[in-house]
Amino acid sequence: MAKKTSFLKYSEDLEKEVRIMDRFFSINFNTVRATSPAVSYETMPFNVKVCSIHMEVAPHGSLKDMLTKAGGTLPENVIGYCIFQVLEGLRDLHQHGYVHCDLKPENILIFPSYAHEDLCELKLGDFGSAKEPNGPDPVDGFLFEDNPGYLVPEAVGPRGVISSAVDIWSLGTMVIEMMGITISGWSDYVPGTLSQMTWDFVRRCRVRNPGDRATAEELMSHEFVRQSLGAPPLELLPVPSCLSNGVG
């Protein structure tokens, strides 16, 4: 199992994270599973107090690791395959009133799949910034301070509005990043270098008005995430071993 440790002042974030993982354990296979529902506390040398949670290990790292190993970009159909699994996780989170609020490649973890037809399993992780139903907005409305390309227009500032649409904007940004394109700020500009199919998917995610963005469930039927991985042959795709060899 993996252990995540933070200073004691972040204990509420860890308590929320393990609570959400435990909540969705029996609902969704696309969220990381906590191996214990409890937060542990200990005192380190020099009287430093810390807290920890435990969760399942992601042997293939994160989607960010996959992207780095592949040279900074992935084939369009591989991206669609990955994004579909992310959408499965988001759909269930949103249906139960949760918002991830920190969706990015670093927080999508990769696990081996034991189903013959699947290449790998992707799961949502890091719920420390998430918004729970009827809970307070995370970090006083400021999100993605270290990732300006993921800034969501309506969430900027102390009066920011947090809804499931925040995750959808981030999803569109994630697709752009996986295509090897850099984009900054919260412009609703969609790069014209994308294929028409990918461009339409990203456009539906990065609409300035959150009420006009597509939902996770709607996006699951988009041709971008429904395209087959059978062509070109999988072994010819420049992807990490966890995709090309199943359990790797």
Image (spheres, rainbow, N blue to C red):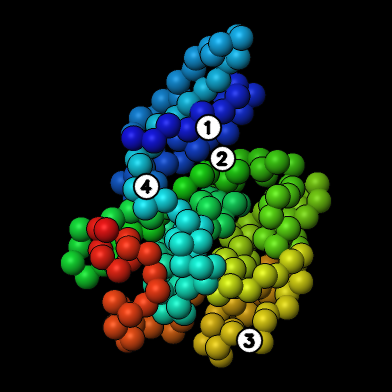
Q: Return the residue at label 3.
A: 193
| Residue at x 30%, y 69% (from the top left corner) | 244
Q: Nearer the viewer, mark 3 or mark 1?
A: 3
Considering the numbered disc 1 on the image, is that residue within a helix, a strand or a loop?
helix
As measured in the structure, the alpha-carbon distance from the residue carrying label 4 to the one carrying label 2 is 18 Å
- How packed mark 2 is, by other alpha carbons closer than 10 Å (few <14, some 14-19, many 20 or more), is many
Earlier sequence position, callout 3 versus callout 1: 1
Amino acid at dot 2: Gly
Q: Which residue lies furthest to the bottom in this view?
A: 196
Marks 4 and 2: CB-CB under 8 Å?
A: no
The residue at 35%/42% (across/down) is 57
Rendered view: 203 above or below 175:
below
Tell me the amino acid under the disc marked 1. Answer: Leu
Q: CA–CA distance between discs 3 and 4? A: 33 Å
Residue 7, horizontal then vertical, whole percent: 60, 24
Seen at 20% across and 58% down, the residue is 114
Sequence-wise first label, 4 or 1? 1
**Tag count:** 4
In the rendered structure, the answer to whether residue 208 lies left or right of residue 130 reads right
Q: Residue 128 carries which label?
A: 2
Q: Which numbered dot is residue 14?
A: 1
Q: Which of marks 3 and 4 is nearer the N terminus?
A: 4
Residue at which label 4 appears: 58
Q: Where is residue 14 in the image (x, y as percent from the top left)?
A: 53, 32
Is 235 rendered above or below residue 10?
A: below
Locate residue 61, reporting x and y percent: 42, 51
